[in-house]
Amino acid sequence: MLKKLVVLFALLALANAVTLRKWIASHEKSCYYAFADAPGKKISFYFAVHSGGNFDIDFEVEGPNNRQLFKGDAERQGDFVFTATQPGEYSFCFKNGLASYVDKLVEFDITVENEARADDITKRSKRDEVMNSVVTIASDLGQITKFMKYFRSRENRNFATVSSTESRVWWFSALQSLSVVLVAVIQVYAIRTLFTAKRTRL
């Protein structure tokens, strides 16, 4: 059991990951960076908008020498995995578009890890069952984490929609009640005026 835990922590230590949540103000551009020290590194990038406006944001991923890798406008979430073809700094930027006037909460995850090569796959097949089971568990945990993030972002969006609908229904009901009271007051006043009006003599 102790051996399994040691191997699991060793595998987790090989990955360099950052998970952040950030409020991005209106018209703000916010960039984050990951460094690949050698070609062949696997970089995964996940983001989801949890709150604000229409739950969308502009994003851009650039590699070394300002080479654009991915770009999207008004995206609610994204999940990208790519191989660093050259060492250097990779930038991940979010921009709260010019048409937006509200702050937006974005959760994102950047992971840099070694990608399995052909010789690594050959060595992996020779590992004992314990090592293979640990690798499988680590992979399954990564998938579960991604699913949890996805469902959490969906839950936040649905909760915001319910809150917005509840607010609109409340204000509509209040306005409708006020209109009924106002019409009733006007009717009472009109009828009272009709019966209390003085008759003019001929």
Image: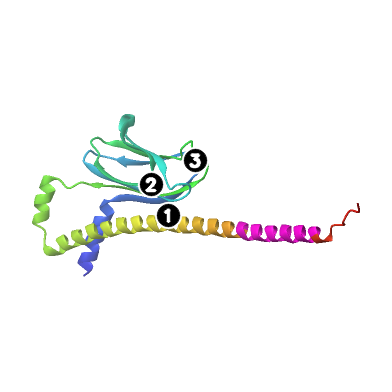
What amino acid does circle 2 point to? Arg
Which residue is labeled 2 in the image? Answer: 76
Can the viewer see residue 93?
no
Q: Measuring 69% from the left and 58% from the top, which residue is drawn there? A: 182
| Residue that lies at the very extreme toward the front in this rendered image | 202
Which residue is labeled 3 in the image? Answer: 100
Note whether 106 is above or below 136 in the view shown. Answer: above
Residue 181 is one of the magenta-drawn residues: yes
- Where residue 194 appears, x then y in whole percent? 79, 58
Q: Are marks 1 and 2 in contact (CB under 8 Å)?
A: yes
What amino acid does circle 1 point to? Arg
Left or right side of 40 for 54: right
Q: For residue 124, which quarter of the picture?
A: bottom left
- Where residue 188 appears, x then y in whole percent? 74, 61
| Residue that lies at the very extreme toward the right in this rendered image | 201
Mark drawn on residue 157: 1
Q: Nearer the viewer, residue 120 or 22?
A: 22
Q: Are marks 1 and 3 in contact (CB under 8 Å)?
A: no
Residue 31 is one of the magenta-drawn residues: no
